[in-house]
Amino acid sequence: MERPAQTSWRPPRACEDYLSEFRHCKSLFNRFHHYYAYGTAASCQQWKVDYNNCREWENHRLTEAKDALRKSERSRLAEQRNFTPVWKLRQEPPSDWHRPLDQENQQDS
């Protein structure tokens, strides 16, 4: 296995974070929630693979582990970008932003 000369690179998350995400993903609550929300069982294997690659990087500085972690994080971020926001973002505040919120109720009285 190849060892890189540069060792200043760090994983985007701590290795314990990958393990924590894996444990959360495997939890009964999360499995039930994922099945209820999406109709399928959650796939947790990638969190375990990422944890193992992170440990390989920390212990042996293997470039294969580093590249696998980078690829996994990039795909995870790309997947998050596929979802459109629920709310339309404002470009400027409403014209009546300075008025009290309960002013409508006072006019009705």
Image (cartoon, rainbow, N blue to C red):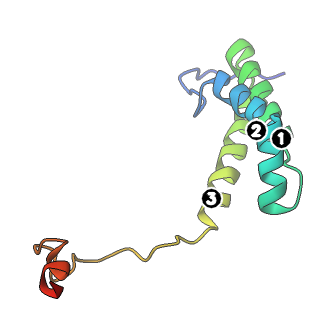
Q: Quadrant of the N terminus?
A: top right
User: Taking 105 as reference, is 65 above or below it?
Assistant: above
Residue found at the very far top of the displayed protein: 59
* Residue extending farthest front: 109
Q: Which residue is drawn at 62% across and 58% down?
A: 80
Residue of label 3: 80
In contact (CB < 8 Å): disc 2 and disc 1: no
Q: Which mark is residue 53?
A: none
Mark 2 or mark 3: whose residue is earlier in sequence: 2
Q: Residue 68 carries which label?
A: 2
Mark closer to the observer (2, 3): 3
Front: mark 2 or 1: 1
The residue nearer to you, when weighing 7 against 81, is 81
Q: Residue at x 77, y 36 (%)?
A: 47
Q: Quadrant of residue 64?
A: top right
Instruction: Give the CA distance from mark 1 to mark 3.
Output: 16 Å
Q: Is residue 107 visible in the rendered structure shown here?
A: yes
In the image, residue 69 lies at what x, y percent? 71, 37
Three-letter code for the amino acid on which mark 2 is drawn: Ala
Tell me the kind of residue under disc 1. Cys
- Measured as percent of width and height from the top left, residue 103 is found at 14, 77
Left or right of 53: which side holds 95? left
Q: Residue at x 23, y 77 (%)?
A: 92
Q: Which of marks 1 and 3 is nearer the N terminus?
A: 1
Residue of label 1: 44
Distance from disc 2 to disc 3, alpha carbons, whole Å, reads 19 Å
In-image side of 7 versus 89 (left or right): right
Q: How far apart are marks 2 and 1 (CA)?
A: 16 Å
Estimate how packed mark 3 is, as few (under 14), some (14 to 19) or many (20 or more) residues with alpha carbons within 10 Å.
few
Q: Along the line of sight, which residue is nearer the eye, 43 or 69? A: 43
Q: Position of residue 7 (x, y in %)?
A: 58, 20
